[in-house]
Structure formats: C-alpha cells, structure tokens
Amino acid sequence: MRKDSETRYSDIFYVSLQMFCKMREKMEDKTIDIEDILRKKFNGKAPRLLTKVLKRLIHQDFINEYLKQGYEGVEFCENAIKYLNVKIEVEGLENLPDAPGTRLTFVSNHPLGGVDGIALAGIIGRKYDGKIKLMVNDFLMHLGGLAPLCIPVNAKIRKKGQEIGTQNRDLPRLTNEIFGSDNQVLMFPAGLCSRKIEGRIQDLVWSKVFVAKSVEHHRDIVPVHFIGENSGRFYRVANLSSILRLKFNIAMAFLPDELYRAQGKTFRIVFGKPIPWQSFDKSRSPKEWAQEVRSAVYSLGKEDK
C-alpha cells in the first residue's frame, strides 16, 4: 500500500517536472495550460484530480494573469516584482562601474529559485541598458517573458553520488559566446537553489566555470548576496528527494508555489565591489577560487546585522 502511494506521489512530481519542459510549447500566447499538457500525456484525457492538484501547485491562473500582459526581458522582471508586491532593498549599487564597455560577471547565491533571479535580472539589466544574460538551471528558464534573457545550463550536478541534472550539450559553446559578448553575465554557480545544510540555508558547492571563463574573457567578478529564504516545506521536500536518491529534482515542482508565497515579502540584495579578474591567479585552482568567492558572497551584509 505504501509503495503504491509513493508511486502515485512520484508520478505527480514527475508530471509536474515534465510540465515545466512543456511550457515552451505555449510560448506563442505565453500562458500555461496544465489540462492540455496532461491531455497529451494521457492519450486525450487529463486525469481530473491530477489536473486540479497541479493547477493549484503551480498557481496556473495567477501566473497566466501576469504572462498575458506580454512583458519581455528587463520589463518582465521589473513588472513581475510589482505584480508580486515584493519589496527589494538594494545596497552597494555604487560599487558597480558605469564606464562604457564594462563587462562583468555577477555571481550570487540562489536561495529562492524564482524571485532572486527575476529581481537581479531586473536591477542589473536596467543599469546596463538591458544587456544581461542569465545562466540558469531551474524554473526561471520556463517563464516566457524571461526566456530571452536566459541561457539553459541544466548542469550535471552530483551530491553523494546522486545525479540531479543532465548536461546541455551546447553548454560549452553557449558559455563561450555569452562570456565573449558585451552582455553582463548573471550566474548562480550552485546550479540549483539553496538547500538546508547543517541547519543553515546555503548553496551547494559552487561550479568553477565562472572563474575560468571570467579570467579567459577578462571580466571582473561582482559578488552578490541575496538575503531571503523559501518556506520550510520546500527544504523538507528537497532533503527528502536527496535521502530517497530520486532521479528527478522534485523540489523544482514547488518553485512556482514558492514564487506565489513570496507575495508581500521584503528581500535584501547586497552588491560587493568587483574583484579584478587578474586576482584569480595560479596560487589557487579555479575550483578553490570559486569557493573563496562563495564565502565572500555570504559575508556581504553581515556587518549590518
């Protein structure tokens, strides 16, 4: 009986993840239609209960009401924050250079998996005339109006032997193109949004890619600390997924709900001073430098607390 129950719940989570991948089929009208997606998956008839559960889980009507407004790029981000009635307190904007031709790599922790990426893309994009690209691996990739700014990472991430994602075959080429462009680059080097580790909300180990590519393309690195948390339920689900060694990231299915729950909240962003790319010398490996920057990110804003 227990196995049957676990199977049913796994099916729900799996279908919801598949749903994110199918969202792009609706890009023409920029809306989400769970019933239509399920109808195609289940040979013409969408299970009523599953449809109801998933509509509530992703808040289809709430998200569609915003998507129908047709915003794209930086405007999508700025108006999404207004739509959610989220307040963003920003510190350190004076640290960001204004010189023509400035090319920076912004690296941030990823506590929310939704509002953090949207808010940062809006703020950085507005300052630099819309010239920004996000390298993302989660729910953000499937928001139609944000998609023009996004590069899909889908990085292969392992934790205690568990594979959580799959590698995008075009990633090396796309990475070189983005870092070689005149766009500002925003990355969440952990690849996934934060988890509760040893009692604290924190990122997984950071990828070294941003260090290696920033040095290669002569980009200074700006550390960014986004201060905020998802609900306790999200972290319990994420930890359960890890314990059960599931082949798919069920926590991602809850990110739309976390976006919905963010309404009316206040979050804080602290921009640090750019770190010259020449600082990342041979005294440490790129992997070690990445963890140094991760530590620097989490130190930002602490002196005010």
Image: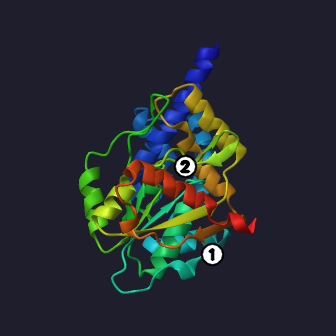
Q: Is residue 173 left or right of residue 260?
A: left
Residue 218 x, y percent position in the rendering: 31, 69
Against 298, is 18 above or below?
above
Residue 146 visible (yes or no): yes
Q: Going 57% across and 40% down the picture, which residue do you hit?
A: 251
Q: Quadrant of the C terminus?
A: bottom right
Against 159, is 264 above or below?
below
Mark number displayed over residue 162: none
Question: For mark 2, does the 10 Å Cα neighbourhood hold few (<14), some (14 to 19), or many (20 or more) residues?
Answer: many
Farthest residue in the top direction?
1
Q: Going 50% across and 45% down the picture, which residue do you hit?
A: 205
Q: Is residue 233 left or right of residue 47?
A: right
Q: Amino acid at mark 1?
A: Glu
Residue behind mark 2? 193
Farthest residue in the right direction?
305
Q: Going 41% across and 77% down the picture, which residue do you hit?
A: 130
For the residues labelled 1 and 2, the Cα–Cα distance comes to 22 Å
> Counting residues from the N terminus, which is met first, the one under dot 1 or under dot 2?
1
Q: Quadrant of the N terminus?
A: top right
Q: Going 56% across and 68% down the picture, which residue do you hit?
A: 119
Q: Is residue 171 left or right of residue 29?
A: left
Q: Amino acid at mark 2?
A: Cys
Residue 86 or 273: which is nearer the viewer?
A: 273
Task: Give the mark toward the camera: 1 or 2.
Answer: 1
Residue 43 or 174: which is nearer the viewer?
A: 174
Residue behind mark 1? 91
Residue 253 or 175: which is nearer the viewer?
A: 175
Residue 27 x, y percent position in the rendering: 39, 59
Against 225, is 200 above or below?
above
Farthest residue in the front direction?
283
Give the color scheme: rainbow, by chain, secondary structure or one colour: rainbow
